[in-house]
Image (cartoon, grey):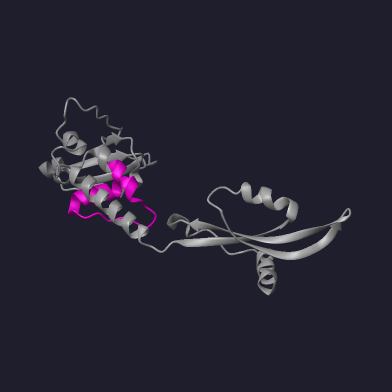
Amino acid sequence: MAEKSPDPSGSNARRCPALSLGERLLPSGSDLSKWVRLNVGGTYFLTTRQTLCRDPKSFLYRLCQADPDLDSDKDETGAYLIDRDPTYFGPVLNYLRHGKLVLNRGLAEEGVLEEAEFYNITSLIKLVKDKIRERDCKMAQLPVKHVYRVLQCQEEELTQMVSTMSDGWKFEQLVSIGSSYNYGNEDQAEFLCVVSKELHNQSYGTNSEPSEKAKILQEQGSRM
């Protein structure tokens, strides 16, 4: 469980060291050695040595064994200092507790994978990679969506506009809407140019609705 750093008391009376909620709930006596306090990126976590030692090849196992090759500093409360993201450490710690990967909304599997690889928890690495592959497979099977745009241009601009289309846009249809005005002694023909682009799965949240002007131009083109 995550906890906050204890605040010192401001009383002038004889003071005992302030205890956090997690420390007040700790068993007394020799059972204290079963518990480990971690300071991960400024957030405190309290767990047992048994939980941290689930994977004997992991960084956390070595931490609990006081591995001399592992540089493990402690803060003023005695918690092990780990300079990692606490947001993604939570799912890692819960996996060690019950063997299941549970992600809150907004957390990405890639973030958990990064932490699992740092802590060298091999079973979690495999599990997250499998979930990423499964997720990507499902996304690849979704129907491809397209976004369409209608552009208005004059005849002299048409060739340049079509030849300079980029960023995945493709020419679909050209509709003549006649001559709108005279330029010098020549009539300038106007066209509606319909272009399309594939809307990738990760972009489904973007606004692909046509503008009011585009709707009007589409209606004009359909009546031609």
Please state the horizontal and vertical placement of residue 24, each as a whole percent of the image. Answer: 24, 48
Q: Is residue 99 magenta?
A: yes
Q: 26 or 222: nearer the eye?
A: 222
At x 15% / y 37%, what residue is drawn?
A: 57
Q: Is residue 6 left or right of residue 64?
A: right
Name the quadrant containing residue 61: top left
Outermost residue on the right side: it is 185
66 left or right, relative to 135: left
As rendered, which of 32 and 224 lies closer to the eye?
224
Residue placed farthest to the left in the image?
Answer: 30
Residue 65 lies, in percent from the top left, at 14, 33
Asked whether 146 falls inside the magenta stretch, the response is no
**Above or below 1: residue 224:** below
Q: Which residue is drawn at the image coordinates 75% and 60% (left, top)?
A: 190
Q: Main secondary structure of the magenta part?
A: helix
List x then y, in percent, for residue 146: 51, 61
- Where does the C terminus fall, quadrant-wise? bottom right
Residue at the extreme bottom of the image, as rendered: 223
Give the magenta range: 88-115
Q: Residue 155 at x, y = what percent?
A: 74, 55
> Along the line of sight, which residue is nearer the eye, 219 or 182?
182
